[in-house]
Amino acid sequence: MQQPDPVEILKLNRIVVYSVIGLFLVLITIYALFIYGKTGQYQDFEDYIFGTYIRIKIASKVNPEKIAKAIFTEMRRLEEKYDPYREGSVLYNLNHSEDWVQVDDETLALVDLSLKLAKQTEGAFDPALGRLIDLWGFSKYSQRSESEFKVPEPREIKEAILLSGYQKITVDYLKKSVKTNGAWLDFGGMLKGYALKRAYQIAKEYDKNCHGFIEAGGQIMILGPKFGRANWIVGIRNPRGNTYDSISYVYLKEGSIATSGDYERYFEIDGVRYHHILDPQTGLPSRGAISVSVVSEDPILADALSTAGFVLGKDRWLYTRTLFPKLGAEVLLITPEMKILKTDNFSIYENPDR
Ligand code: AMP
Ligand code: MG
């Protein structure tokens, strides 16, 4: 028998070793792609809730579709529960009762928080403006067509003011009951923020490492940094430009930014713009700002304070500038003259290298 050539054996061994290494590299690449596919690739979901588009951009090793579905279901639950025009809803019952109404824990906490925010902002944010909002037709729940809008009579506004205001709302914490005393509660100025807080909690319960963001109307809640490490870049819309025209950008890895603008819901008569953010003192659309953006860790605070900052406007800017950062919120306000006012630390968020 012929002896095997030692050179041939060496060649064969080398081929085997290279094949094994090659196979190993291919397997590693497939595994890396698989992991990247699970955590690094964003999926987008969209639904229409609270009279606005809700967009979710999420990457997660848990089924992102499942997370998005759970979030939309929760948001729809809140939309129905606090729809003041839906017979039988929690707010409908509260607004249409002359007596104490027992409420569940979630509602008690929301009413309590809304009253606290009203006191902190000296009533600029007021959750009991339901009658005024209804008079103007600006509720997120009662969408009117352009031709249906009209400027209410001064007498009607006066009457609605008399039956509005957070001071009217009384709470019995022991009996877990609320009495509206003729006023109508409307959570339009903070409910999206609350829904975003719940959305964040739900996403993190499914997967604490998920990342991405959720957009609801003029507000964004960050779920986690882009690709797990980078800032998300959020444009602040030029209130007199189109949707994609930004006057500034903020860079966020966490937290929320909310913008209240006079371009979101309005009608025009004889060249005058009547929009949906009302000054509780006058009962008229607030004129001291045209856009207010608030960055905060807490989406409820960002939402409520963007509405409040709008009402406080340029005339009470010193108050906003002093108080809001203490509450955990930085503000950018655009005056009707297009002048930009910022709290001292707002520019931190405008730095791409933060
Ligand atoms: P936002 O877009 O978050 O500023 O909220 C505006 C919505 O909040 C309006 O559509 C009303 O439902 C409600 N709203 C209007 N004015 C006020 C106010 N001064 N305080 C609280 N909520 C308000
Ligand atoms: Mg708001």
Image (tube, rainbow, N blue to C red):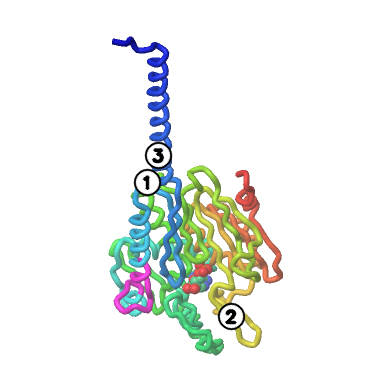
Q: How far is mark 3 from mark 2, CA to CA? A: 58 Å
| Neighbourhood count class around disc 1 (C-alpha, 10 Å): few under 14, some 14–19, many 20 upward | some
Mark 3 or mark 2, which is nearer to you?
Answer: 3
Specify the amino acid type for callout 1.
Lys
Label at residue 250: none
Q: Considering only order in the chain, which callout, 2 or 3, is on the residue closer to the N terminus?
A: 3
Reading the image, the residue beneath label 1 is: 61
The answer to which image quadrant residue 6 occupies is top left
Point out residue 185 in the picture as x, y percentages from the top left corner: 41, 73
Quick check: marks 1 and 2 in contact, CB under 8 Å?
Answer: no
Residue 31 shows in this picture:
yes
Residue depicted at 40% across the width and 16% down the height? 8
Q: Residue 30 carries which label?
A: 3
Circle 2 packing at 10 Å, graded few (<14), some (14-19), many (20+), is: many
Three-letter amino acid code at the position of disc 2: Tyr
Q: Which of 253 and 174 is in front in this view?
A: 253
Q: Which of 303 and 28 is in front in this view?
A: 28
**Upstream in sequence: badge 1 or badge 3:** 3
Magenta region: 78-91
Query: SS class of the residue under badge 2?
Result: strand
Residue located farthest toward the front when viewing the structure as drawn: 1
Q: What element carries label 1?
A: loop
Picture layout, residue 324 above or below residue 261: above
Identify the mark nearer the N-term, 1 or 2.
Answer: 1
Q: According to the image, label 2 marks what residue?
A: 274
